[in-house]
């Protein structure tokens, strides 16, 4: 049954401030289930409807007897990812591989959990039949599909009999589906409790497109051993957010380990599912849960309310990402980093780096850096995203949360963070900025040689990202790492000479932009936000980079991007009202299909 969903003002404000509590999470879960049912109706009415009809009919029959069970299945993350695939995968119907047929596996899950008789054909891929939330049937050979029969039995839940028939062979599953055997790999459920707050989350590996679980180095026992202290940390230090996770965390999905660090992500279609590689320690797991669950909350909230108008071709700067972001991606990142900010603020205590050793100093550094990221993201969104009234209200609340922290880092830490932020933005501009065409370049060179102001600057265009995107490179990372221990930036004149000598090294421009900003030189804004244009003109007609940047800063007489961003940044810092405060609720929309790291 579809449920109307209205977001009360108080819950909207609480969510926008970064939390919301279990009540807000339960509302978002109900909204997600309604959205899933709308997508199911769309699938059934489309060209793939016949493929999904048997499973939909089975779900409807089970729902009459066990509505809570079916509600949990249709509101769950596996149903959301299935619905998104089925809606956009109609062309596959003509090739016989229609994703709509995969609904049958979810109907089997509902039948097993409700202990209701069922028999239905389920697709088999690469010899595996996944039953999300329960486990995976393996060893089915080349069969394209299997007939799954569920026979209810007496006794506690899970005591029903499940038989698989594929390729002329019967494959009975163990009566206790929590135990492996007979080609059955069950999903492990991690259960932890601390101070009366319990968390039960499947370690989900049933989807064949996800990596197999390494049961030697990171099996269920190892994950449980990591989750237990992570949960204790969350309950003790972030009780409000822990309560949200207890209400809405739906699955952990192991990812392959990256070359360095920890990878984590969230699918906007799978509310509460956190994909993560093996974390280094419980703290990292706790941080990943906080960050990724923020993505889930905002994805579900934006099904109900519009925070901005369209996404268009926006390619915006997000300081936590190496690539340009659309408007929705920028807002997602700002919101997710509120989880990081809460984590590092608590870890840093007073936040001045002078506490009980290197752990607190590191947390203070990360808290200051995260706050700078969020503030810069807010400024970018305010300047470039066409916000609705609710979008303005939402960012107001985010800004309130940022300002409400008690972190007051010392001047040295502030300078170091500012240098890194400035340098990283300059490097981003070098990478993605579109250089002016030959005519515009010739005009600027001629005006500078003639001693005239530059006039209107070329458009501040940004290239789209194509293919895999890596970080800024080892030279820039080494430069950024050095700033943490540096009292001040390198003198700007020395940095300018280094950039002129090696103009193709991004770290030289990062150093120059940071030094110019710290010394408050006239061309500092151009070196940070039009770095690509400064370097392009330098390569076209070499001149002192500082003089060139100052000359460019004298142009653009009509009040450009730079002033827009500066005003937005000052408004965020000063706590000014960034717009009206219209409060409305809107009907559910359809989310995209991005994975949100």
Image: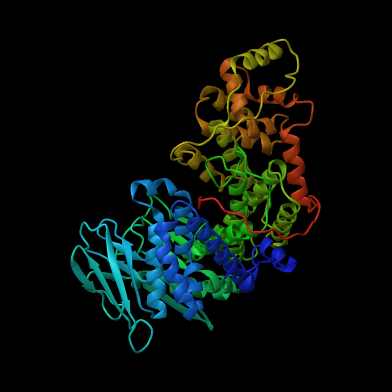
Query: For residue 102, which quarter of the picture?
Result: bottom left
Q: Relative to 432, is 349 above or below?
A: below
Query: Which color scheme did the rendering employ for the protein?
Result: rainbow
Q: Relative to 323, is 126 above or below?
A: below
Residue at image position (69%, 66%) is 6
Query: For residue 282, which quarter of the picture?
Result: bottom left
Query: For residue 486, which quarter of the picture?
Result: top right
User: Where is residue 325 drawn, in percent x and y?
Assistant: 57, 43
The quarter in which the N terminus is drawn is bottom right
Q: Depth check: 381 or 90 in front?
A: 90
Q: Is residue 218 visible?
A: no
Q: Depth check: 552 or 36 in front?
A: 36
User: Where is residue 380 drawn, in percent x and y?
Assistant: 67, 43
User: Where is residue 280 drawn, in percent x and y?
Assistant: 41, 61
Q: Relative to 289, is 365 above or below?
A: above
Looking at the image, residue 321 sits to the left or right of residue 282; the answer is right
């Amino acid at each position: 049954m579809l449920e109307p969903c209205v977001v009360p003002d108080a819950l909207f404000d609480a969510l926008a401030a970064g939390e919301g509590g279990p009540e807000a999470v339960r509302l978002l879960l109900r909204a997600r289930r309604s959205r899933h049912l709308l997508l199911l109706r769309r699938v059934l009415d489309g060209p793939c409807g016949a493929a999904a009809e048997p499973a939909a009919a089975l779900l409807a029959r089970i729902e009459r007897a066990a509505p809570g069970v079916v509600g949990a299945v249709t509101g769950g993350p596996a149903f959301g990812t299935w619905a998104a695939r089925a809606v956009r995968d109609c062309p596959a119907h003509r090739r016989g591989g229609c994703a709509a047929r995969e609904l049958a596996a979810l109907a089997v899950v509902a039948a097993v959990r409700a202990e209701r008789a069922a028999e239905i054909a389920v697709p088999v891929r690469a010899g595996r039949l996944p039953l999300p939330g329960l486990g995976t049937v393996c060893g089915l050979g080349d069969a394209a599909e299997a007939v799954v029969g569920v026979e209810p039995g007496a006794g506690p839940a899970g005591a029903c009999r499940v038989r698989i028939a594929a390729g002329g062979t019967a494959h009975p599953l163990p009566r206790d589906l929590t135990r492996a055997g007979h080609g059955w790999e069950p999903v492990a459920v991690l259960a932890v409790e601390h101070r009366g707050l319990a968390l039960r989350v499947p370690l989900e590996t049933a989807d064949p497109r996800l990596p197999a679980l390494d049961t030697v180095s990171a099996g269920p026992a190892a994950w449980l051993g990591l989750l237990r202290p992570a949960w204790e940390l969350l309950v003790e230090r972030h009780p409000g957010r822990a309560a949200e996770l207890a209400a809405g965390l739906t699955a952990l999905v192991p990812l392959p380990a990256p070359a360095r660090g920890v990878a984590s992500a969230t699918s906007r279609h799978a509310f509460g599912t956190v994909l993560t590689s093996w974390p280094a320690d419980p703290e990292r797991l706790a941080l990943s849960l906080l960050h990724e669950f923020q993505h889930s909350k905002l994805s579900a909230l934006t099904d109900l309310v519009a925070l901005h108008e369209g996404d268009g071709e926006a390619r915006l700067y997000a300081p936590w990402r190496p690539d340009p972001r659309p408007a929705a991606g920028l807002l997602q990142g700002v919101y997710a980093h509120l989880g990081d900010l809460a984590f590092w603020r608590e870890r840093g205590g007073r936040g001045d780096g002078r506490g009980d050793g290197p752990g607190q100093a590191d947390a203070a550094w990360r808290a200051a850096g995260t706050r700078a990221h969020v503030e810069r993201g807010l400024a970018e969104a305010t300047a470039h995203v066409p916000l609705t009234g609710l979008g303005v209200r939402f960012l107001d609340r985010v800004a309130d949360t940022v300002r409400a922290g008690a972190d007051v880092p010392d001047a040295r830490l502030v300078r170091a963070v500012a240098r890194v932020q400035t340098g990283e933005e300059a490097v981003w501009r070098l990478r993605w900025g579109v250089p002016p065409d030959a005519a515009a370049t010739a005009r600027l060179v001629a005006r500078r040689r003639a001693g005239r102001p530059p006039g209107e600057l070329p458009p501040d265009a940004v290239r789209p990202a194509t293919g895999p995107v890596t970080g800024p490179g080892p030279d820039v990372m080494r430069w950024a790492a050095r700033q943490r221990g540096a009292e001040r930036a390198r003198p700007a004149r020395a940095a300018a000479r280094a950039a002129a000598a090696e103009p193709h090294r991004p770290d030289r421009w990062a150093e120059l932009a940071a030094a110019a900003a710290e010394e408050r030189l006239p061309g500092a804004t151009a070196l940070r936000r039009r770095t690509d244009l400064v370097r392009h003109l330098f390569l076209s007609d070499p001149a002192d980079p500082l003089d060139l940047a100052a000359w460019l800063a004298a142009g653009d007489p009509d009040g450009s991007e730079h002033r827009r961003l500066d005003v937005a940044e000052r408004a965020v810092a000063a706590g000014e009202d960034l717009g009206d405060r219209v409060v409305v609720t809107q009907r559910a929309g359809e989310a995209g299909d991005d994975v949100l790291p």
